Image (cartoon, helix red, strand yellow):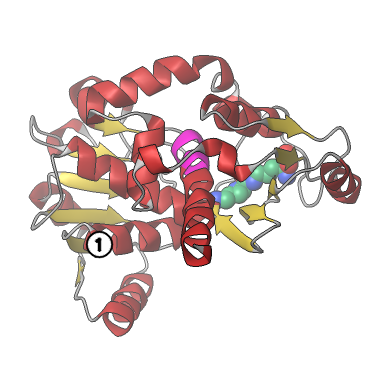
Amino acid sequence: MTRLKEEDIACIAWQLKEYDHELQKKTGHSLAEIAAHAVGLQTKAAHASLLGRIAVIPVTSGQGIISGFSRTVAGILDHLGVNTFVTAASDVGGFAEAIERGTETIFLADDDRFIAVNLKLRVYSDNSDSTGKGYAAALDYMTGGLKDKSVLVLGAGPVGRSAALSIIGFGGEVHIYDKSERASSTLSQLILDSSGRKIYVEHDLTRALEEHRRIIVACPEAGFITNNYLHADSYVAAPGVPLGIHPAALNTIWPRLIHDPLQLGVATMCYDLLNSIISEGGKER
Ligand code: 2YH
């Protein structure tokens, strides 16, 4: 699993408006609309304020605090219209501070997990899961719909698994490639058992790249997708950091490429929790 570096996220907070415009140009939809689509919500029904006040707590365990990480997460949530603050204290002190300041939702990450917890409902959203969903939703919008279309998912880890399940939800056909054939087969079996849907295991990366025009890059290998695999009708959604597109191919694919280190994943975590809150409200009525 990639641990984000300070330089991966340094520019995010002050470029959120530009990033949102870029998403709108590429997919026809805003960051909030894509995140809502990822969890099956209408943006109109989802008022970000329903989340109450959000605290982001810096966590020192493992390799420690990533400078700017909590502030960037808070910036993304602010951009979505949620009242967010970063606690002054880290870890347990930060948790106490969040409760004292009337927080209902907490975002926090260590080196392995990044979650958002809603304290009222006792539900949480996982970043890997939300990132997979968010990128599948962006690809669905960007391509005009994945129904009956085949999508190559590169990487059978938590992000790839979540993306694969979402693509199936959008009616698409999943082809999975992972450098560990065992990981691909395990995922294929898991999806068959849980949903009765078949996904196709690809054994040869070169052939898989040659044959597909819709690709989700859910692995952290840099620059392996070169220009010869990318065409005027290729679409790539790449949550993986570092980016799998070769620098020389960036110009070709840029108008049909979705890639960011944090924004779509965090936005989808937010809408995932909103979805739980809205469904819970529905049950009460
Ligand atoms: O970047 C990460 C992990 N790779 C989580 C990945 C989840 N998909 N964690 C960030 C660690 C942040 C640090 N503990 C802080 O600043 O609070």
The residue shown at (39%, 32%) is: 31
> Does residue 219 appear in the picture of this structure?
no
Q: Is residue 149 left or right of residue 253?
A: left
Say which of 76 and 109 sits in front: 76
The image quarter in which residue 52 lies: top right
Residue 138 colored in magenta in the image = no
The image quarter in which residue 78 lies: top right
Q: Is residue 95 left or right of residue 72?
A: right
The extreme front residue here reads 285
**Residue 140's x, y, as percent?**
22, 45
The residue shown at (53%, 64%) is: 284
Where 257 falls versus 35 (above or below)? Answer: above
Say which of 4 and 173 sits in front: 173
Q: Main secondary structure of the magenta part?
A: helix
Task: Name the quarter showing ligand 1.
Answer: top right
The residue shown at (20%, 62%) is: 174
Residue 266 colored in magenta in the image = yes
* Residue at which label 1 appears: 169
**Residue 272's x, y, as percent?**
48, 52
Magenta stretch?
262-267
Say which of 78 and 181 sits in front: 78
Give SS at disc 1: helix
